[in-house]
Amino acid sequence: MYTQYLTTNKNKQKEIIKNAKLINNKKELYNYLISNTKKRNKSCYGDFTVIGQDGFSIVYINNIPHNMPHLGWVDIGENVWIGSHCTIDRGTLENTVIGDNVKIDNHVHIGHNCKIGNNVVIGAGAIIGGSTIIDANSIVYMGEIIPSHSHIYATQSNPNVCDSVPVMETKLIITDLDDTLWKGGIGDDGINGIKILDQHKKLQAKLKELSQKGVMLAIASKNEENIALDAIDNHPDMLLNREDFVTWRINWQNKADNIKSMLKQLNVTEKGLIFIDNNVLERKLIQNMLPDVSVITEEDTKRLSMYRVEQQRQKEKNKFKTAKEWIDSLQIEFNFRLMSKNEIRRVEQLFSRVNQMTNIDTKFNYDKINTLSSNIWVVALKINLVIMV
């Protein structure tokens, strides 16, 4: 069956090449190789660059890997500059597209089916996985590795691809603290309980670099201010310090209102702001209340779903005018009931985690909770939430 497919697609490939009047099909020119490529005026390539070869797509037949034949092209726009030792794969069925005025440094790989928008700048050594979309006016810096099927927005990024934020378009980055700049909750875990892992160090390093380039940093966190600032000042693994932040709102108020307050204080518009928070509810609140803010998602968010969600958000971004309208849309329901025996372990966990907002010193272990079970009530919370990650 695979042999039939391969033979059919080779014939189809010849037909496409014939009908498209392909330029320089598999003909070596000045130390670079161009095939299956359509280019427009004023585009040029460096030495030893290969454009239009098949991408890396594998099918297994009887546990033996075979290369999948490609039928697409590489469509290169006007005024494109591609450095030396670059590879740009042709598409499988659709085309790989390089927009107008794109500038690509040396040793860059662009996988099959990618769509690179107009005016994109890609630094040396970048690797862009197949089927990635990079919006117009984006910047991909030296050595970036972008996974396949990503979508890089012109004013949006994520912890894995921090460098894709165009510095000149971003005036302010507001970040959460708990499970964002560190792992854990500072109020419950304390300064010795939170951990700053490699991904947190990477994010902090990038934020510090951006602040040194003129991007303002701020904090929006639901915590006690003195406890949070003490962690920033004194945790031994912190790369950022208090002086890196131009302002902060560390309290228990609505984050949307806190962000509006900081925007007014700093005279910055929503369009110049990026918001980083691990909490999906906080992100959804900001997306609805401040629709022009670019919201960064969690590290493990699927990049394709980002694209679909972004389209949905654009359609609904003016749906909610106030925080009350957004809360009403959640259709929150509370169910009060006596605790059941199979909930004792979970209640014990909750008691052990909550030490920031309690006025009692009693420790509730399993045995004590079991003894008091007939007098303990639990609250079940139901939220109608469309998760926008």
Image (spheres, helix red, strand yellow):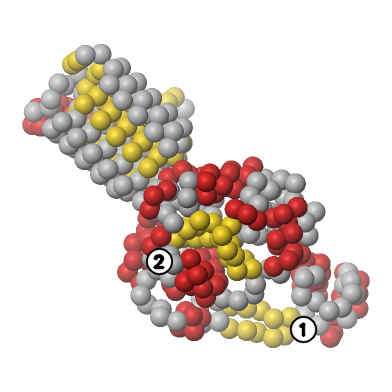
Residue 117 image position (x, y, % from top left): 28, 45
How many marks the image carries: the answer is 2
Does residue 189 show up?
Answer: yes
At mark 1, the secondary structure is: strand
Which label lies toward us, 2 or 1?
2
Write the residue at 46% across / 32% down: 143
Q: CA distance from mark 2 to mark 1?
A: 46 Å
Give the quadrant of the N terminus. Answer: top left
Q: Which residue is mark 1?
A: 377
Q: Quadrant of residue 369?
A: bottom right
150 relative position to 351: left or right: left
183 relative position to 112: left or right: right
Task: In this rendered view, identify the residue nearer to me: 73 or 85.
Answer: 85
Callout 1 amino acid: Trp
Write the residue at 63% across / 54% down: 243
Residue 59 image position (x, y, % from top left): 39, 31
234 relative position to 331: left or right: right
Mark 2 neighbour density, 10 Å: few (under 14) some (14–19) many (20 or more): some
Write the residue at 25% across / 17% down: 32
Task: In this rendered view, identify the residue nearer to me: 374 or 292.
Answer: 292
Residue 294 image position (x, y, % from top left): 43, 60
Q: Which residue is mark 2?
A: 269
Residue 69 tag number: none
In the displayed structure, 224 sits above or below 148; it is below
At mark 2, the secondary structure is: loop
Q: Are marks 2 and 1 in contact (CB under 8 Å)?
A: no
Callout 2 amino acid: Thr
In the displayed structure, 19 sits above or below 202; it is above
Mark 1 neighbour density, 10 Å: few (under 14) some (14–19) many (20 or more): few
